[in-house]
């Protein structure tokens, strides 16, 4: 009884909490990723939103070469390098959203974090996540849908092995830049390397360590889905692994974005205030403009239908 009276006379933790100056954080967005792919790409700013990819015409060319060791009467070959007459044009695609914020909420609850800034920040992060997904999966310009048939290979045994990675390198042999793979695919590759006694080395980029193969970093991305999911339902599943050469000078893969956007904040991203309606709702229009161009067929290769659920038991 005495203990009950003592508790009744004391300030409860629930009540005291209301006056406590607790440490607060900004909103944590659990589905955000490092988005490595855009960091490894070279980006080209466009003035009109269109990028025409001019190419030399495939097939025989009348321009030939003649090697002569001594002066003679051999005729120097004549000709020209022909171009494709209907080159592909890449048009920037937009990813947009509208954020609505009640001005009363913004006025009353903007300490310690400004509500408008937080809403825009989180919306921008979502747009950038979608942008990276489109760079990989877009039906129009995504890497997976635009790999040439000659650059598509299958794994030797289902799981991603060092032999398969070497085969990818044989397809993108001119200065390959990065492998792209789902984290589960990287783990599966690591198990195959462990089984063979050839653990991958590591390299540091942007303050982060990446596994490598033959000196090429293996960059993780959950935008290369496993059975159509970012987060696989079980241990098994199939995915794809890409090897990419980046950069315009290398005739590789090039990111495209719009230059000089009104309301532009970062590369290809614009935030515009749309006004306040009669209910006191402020609206902000957010758009990111981007595309991706593969300058040469041998700039990308893909290892298709890789199994990520193969495990091994080792004798102790």
Image: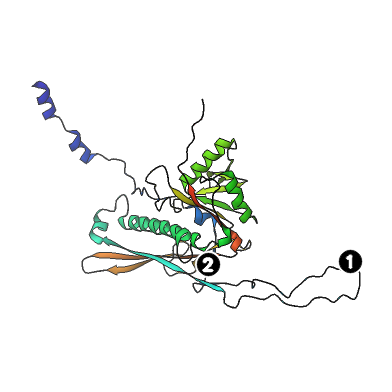
Does residue 56 sit above or below 166 in this rendering? below
Q: Is residue 11 above or below residue 215?
A: above
**Quadrant position of residue 12:** top left
Q: Residue at x 49, y 32 (%)?
A: 313
- In the picture, measured across the screen, residue 158 lies left or right of residue 103, that is right
In the rendered structure, the answer to whether residue 247 lies left or right of residue 5 reads: right
**The one of 232 and 313 positioned closer to us in this rendering:** 313
Residue nearer the viewer, 135 or 188: 188
Residue 27 horizontal/vertical position (percent): 33, 49
Q: Secondary structure at mark 1?
A: loop
Position of the N terminus, as image quadrant, is top left
Q: Which residue is disc 2 drawn over? A: 45
Whole-percent x and y of residue 235? 41, 42
- Distance in Å between CA atoms under marks 2 and 1: 47 Å
Please report the residue visible at 82 percent of the width from the left and 70 percent of the height from the top.
66
Q: Is 5 placed left or right of 162 in the picture? A: left
- Above or below, 90 against 235 in this view is below
The residue at the far right in this view is 71
Query: Residue 69 got which mark?
Result: 1
Q: Which of the numbered marks, if any, corresponds to residue 34?
A: none
Q: What residue is shown at x 59% (from left), y 53% (from top)?
A: 177
Dividing the picture into quarters, in which one does residue 234 lie? top left
């Amino acid at each position: 009884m005495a203990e009950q009276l003592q508790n009744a006379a004391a300030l409860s933790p629930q009540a005291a909490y209301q006056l406590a100056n607790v440490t607060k954080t900004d909103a944590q967005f659990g589905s955000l990723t490092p988005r490595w792919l855009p960091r490894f790409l070279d980006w080209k700013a466009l003035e009109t939103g269109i990028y025409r990819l001019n190419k030399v015409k495939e097939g025989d060319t009348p321009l030939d070469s003649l090697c002569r060791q001594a002066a003679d009467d051999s005729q120097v070959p004549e000709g020209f390098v022909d171009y494709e007459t209907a080159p592909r044009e890449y048009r920037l695609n937009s990813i947009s959203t509208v954020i609505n914020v009640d001005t009363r909420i913004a006025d009353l609850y903007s300490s310690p974090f400004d509500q408008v800034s937080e809403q825009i920040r989180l919306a921008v992060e979502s747009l950038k996540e979608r942008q990276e997904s489109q760079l990989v999966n877009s039906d129009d310009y995504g890497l997976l849908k635009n790999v040439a048939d000659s650059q598509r290979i299958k794994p030797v045994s289902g799981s991603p092995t060092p032999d398969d990675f070497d085969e990818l390198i044989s397809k993108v042999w001119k200065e390959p830049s990065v492998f792209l793979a789902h984290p589960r695919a990287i783990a599966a590759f690591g198990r195959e390397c462990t089984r063979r006694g050839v653990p991958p080395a590591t390299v540091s980029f942007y303050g982060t360590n990446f596994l490598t193969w033959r000196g090429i970093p293996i960059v993780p991305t959950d935008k290369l889905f496993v059975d159509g999911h970012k987060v696989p339902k079980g241990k098994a599943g199939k995915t794809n692994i890409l090897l990419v050469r980046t950069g315009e000078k290398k005739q590789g893969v090039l990111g495209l974005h719009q230059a000089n956007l009104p309301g532009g904040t970062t590369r290809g991203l614009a935030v515009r205030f749309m006004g306040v309606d009669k209910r006191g709702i402020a609206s902000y229009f957010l758009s990111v403009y981007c595309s991706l161009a593969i300058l040469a067929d041998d700039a990308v290769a893909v290892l298709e239908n890789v199994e990520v659920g193969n495990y091994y038991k080792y004798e102790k």
